[in-house]
Image (cartoon, rainbow, N blue to C red):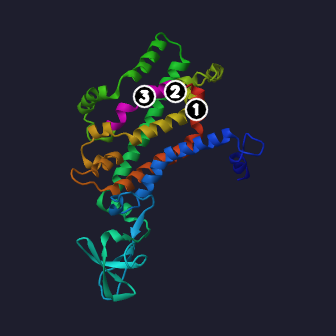
Amino acid sequence: MSNVLSFLTRTRGRGRFDLTDWLTWGYLALAVVLMFGPVFWVALSSFKTESALQEYPPSLLPLAPVSVTVEGYEEPLQLFRVTGGERAGEVLAQIRRIGLNSQMVDPENPGERINVNINDRVPVREFALAAENYTVLFERFNFALYFWNSVFITVVATIITVLFNSMAAFALSKYRFRGRTAVFILIIATLMIPPTINLVPIFLVVSELGLVNSPWGVIWPAVATPTGVFLLRQYMLTIPDDLLDAARMDHASEWRVYWRIVLPLAAPALAVLVIFSVMWRWNEFLWPLIVLNRSEEFTLQLALNSFQGDLQTSWAPLLAMTVLTLLPITLVFAVLQKYITAGIAQSGVK
């Protein structure tokens, strides 16, 4: 803790904040607000009620109107603070609204009815979390099924992606054969092809193989990525060939050299590819939207899209589901983030 405080209070000036310190802190504070502000806003909004989300101007915190039980009335009455007229400053309970007037009553003196202009009162609200936004997900939608579909596609696709890309990178970095450079350039050149151009041909192949409405139709087309091959190849070039030759002299097979020597040494680059693959697969929307037509095969991203109706959108559960969708990818990034800098720097990817 003392090291953190020492780091945060470190200055260029002699015990005082220099101009560059203020500029640095201002820049960092602005970056934090721009990066985490929208996520923080979505997380807080996911606990608001549907009516609170429609308010203008919007409030940052989830606030709910306060109601009170008044003698003589069966239903709780909402409290308002009077801002004008003879009753300014008092907190009254609204019985009903009639045109531009609000018929109200003092909870301490329910026998007297008071007419207040609707422009002379503001609702009394308190901090309240609308947890039902999350519970309704499990009541109205098969959230567990969508979550399982996303987890299955993400985990299996990531494993296959890491395996295939590392094999290709191992061959392109440690074997010398005619056309090696041409093959590598051809793989890298596919980065210049927009993904949308490949959608129709890939869908025709997937359809011929009978993989439409199957998670494998989402997994297989994207397991070989030029970014992954390039990242792993560049990192494997830094592994000394002498280690591999020594293993071969000890009669190790090529699979053993790849599995027991190259893969452990390429762990930082593999961690980066795992993070990238998890982010790609978890957030993928367009290709699953094309391949998956049955709702029982939907991923979380497609289920999120189903919240959007033609005439009305349920924003409260939509935001709650968005927060739940962000949690797994955030956890993966938090666990593996220490490998990102080392893996990217040592593989030469900018």
Q: Position of residue 256 (x, y in %)?
A: 56, 28
Q: Is residue 347 above or below residue 180?
A: below
Quarter holding residue 269: top right
Query: Pointer 3: residues within 10 angstroms few (<14), some, or many (20+)?
Result: some
- The residue tagged 3 is 225
Query: Hey, what amino acid is under mark 3?
Result: Thr
Residue with the most extreme right position:
14
Type of amino acid under label 2: Leu
| 134 relative to 165 in the view: left or right | left
Mark 2, secondary structure of its residue: helix
Q: Can you give x and y, in whole percent of width and height, for residue 279 in the image? A: 44, 40
Q: Quadrant of residue 55 in the image?
A: bottom left
Distance Cα–Cα, label 2 vs label 1 = 9 Å
Residue 92 is a magenta residue = no
Q: Which residues are magenta?
A: 217-232
What residue is drawn where x is 31% and y is 76%? Answer: 116
Of the numbered discs 1 and 3, the one sitting upstream in the chain is 3
On whether residue 221 falls in the magenta region, the answer is: yes
Task: Residue at 42% x, 78% y: name it.
Answer: 90
Instruction: Tell me if residue 68 can be seen.
Output: yes
Question: Residue 252 versus residue 172: which sits nearer the camera?
Answer: 172
C-alpha distance separating marks 1 and 3? 17 Å
Q: Amino acid at mark 1?
A: Gly
Residue where numbered disc 2 is placed = 231
Quadrant containing the C terminus is top right
Q: Residue at x 43, y 42 (%)?
A: 155
Residue 343, numbered circle: 1
Mark 1: few/some/many CA within 10 Å (<14, 14-19, 20+): many
The picture places residue 189, in percent across and down from the top left corner, at 41, 19
Q: Secondary structure at mark 3?
A: loop
> Percent from the top left, x then y, of residue 135?
37, 63
